[in-house]
Amino acid sequence: MKSRVYFTAVKDAEDIKEVNGQLKKLLEKSRVLDVIRKKDKVGIKMHFGEAGNTGYVRPAHVRVICDGVLSKGAGATLSDANTLYRGRRLHAEDHLALAREHGFTKKALGIDVVIPDDKKEEDIAAVQINQKHIQTAKAARLFIDADAIVSISHFKGHALTGFGGAIKNIGMGCATREGKLAQHCDVAPVFYTDRCNGCGECELVCPAEAISMENDKAVLDRSKCIGCASCVAACPNMTIFIDTEAGDAVQKKMAEYAYAVLGNKKGKACFLNFALRINQECDCWPFKNPRIAPDVGIFASLDPVAIDKASFDLVNQASGEDIFKKAHPKEDGLKQLRHAQDIGLGSMEYDLISV
């Protein structure tokens, strides 16, 4: 059975008033927020952007969604989990400070903004799922204990998964640092030292101290590597890559983590993808992040698989080619969707309803 995906076109992401008008229309017509009931505890999941990044969904748009949730008589918390890589989002206190710097405050949004501390056991939930790659998932308890989840995703490219949308926002984004490590641990990158200019950026960002400079070339100690891919993102010369087979494992583990988070949310989760200001890399990227596609629009659905497939299709249609494969030729982002479909997260078949 095909899933419904609602879509509103946006010509210019910089026209915030126009985007918000389209977003309000989308929420009204799609009624995706009807999954929320009075007095529900709602976890709203999004990515606040790394320091130096500007691609994340703007607070002005998030406010529209927050208002819609509050109008249901529910209580809500806007949140994200900490990162595996070294940066401003590594620890809860710094992560929250960065979110505020980017405009995500209670005053701006009307709800609390919280970053769970995965050094505290009470903030961590262990979810047994017994899937092929993941037996027990470690996720932020805030999302597991929530009565309902609203996912707000910036749809863009990604070095490990081809693209990132709803599945990545929930599967990777709700995982604790231990959970993120479990998803990445098979992914030791390949260093093409003949192309390395010895800038040392990869060594600086490696949280495991697995990279050293020898004869002005970066060298990886694979026994120390935790597979976070910080070096891949940091390399300005594109000389570090992820092995395709390892990247496949990340995608499947990510889908299984999404299954863990959404397993007790049947009929209580909805998803919004913003295919605007579409960048080559994730919003974790703190460097110049080139745009790879025109602004397309905003999607809404109750199916995380269908919304990602529809977003993927329409972005490529607008670009006239598979822009994600062009940006990351060794990755097939649809593998995450095929695996998600196989384990029962949703359907890749959809009916697109324009509003």
Image (tube, rainbow, N blue to C red):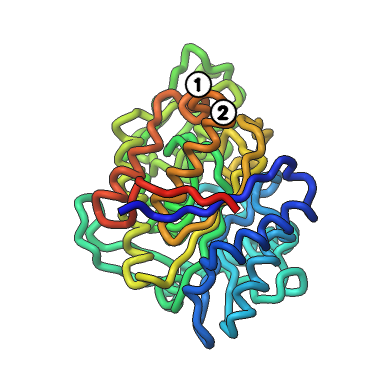
Name the outermost residue toward the bottom: 39
> SS for tag 2?
loop
Q: Which residue is drawn at 46% across and 17% down?
A: 193
Image quadrant in which you'd find residue 69 = bottom right
Residue labelled with disc 1: 239
Mark 1 neighbour density, 10 Å: few (under 14) some (14–19) many (20 or more)? some
- Residue 86 location (% of width, % of height): 55, 48
Q: Could one spot residue 182 in this view of the protein?
A: no
- Residue 169 location (% of width, % of height): 48, 54
Nearer to the camera, 9 or 56: 9
Q: Residue at x 42, y 52 (%)?
A: 167
Looking at the image, residue 79 sits to the left or right of residue 258; the answer is: right
> Which amino acid, mark 2?
Cys
Mark 2 neighbour density, 10 Å: few (under 14) some (14–19) many (20 or more)? some
Q: Could one spot residue 176 in this view of the protein?
A: yes
- Residue 222 location (% of width, % of height): 35, 34
Mark linked to residue 19: none
Looking at the image, residue 154 sits to the left or right of residue 122; the answer is: right
Q: Residue at x 65, y 33 (%)?
A: 294
Residue labelled with disc 2: 235
Q: How many marks?
A: 2
> SS for tag 1?
loop
Q: Which residue is drawn at 44% across and 61% down?
A: 302
Tell me, yes or no, whether the two marked residues, 2 and 1, touch with CB atoms within 8 Å: yes
As measured in the structure, the alpha-carbon distance from the residue carrying label 2 to the one carrying label 1 is: 7 Å
Looking at the image, residue 12 sits to the left or right of residue 185; the answer is: right
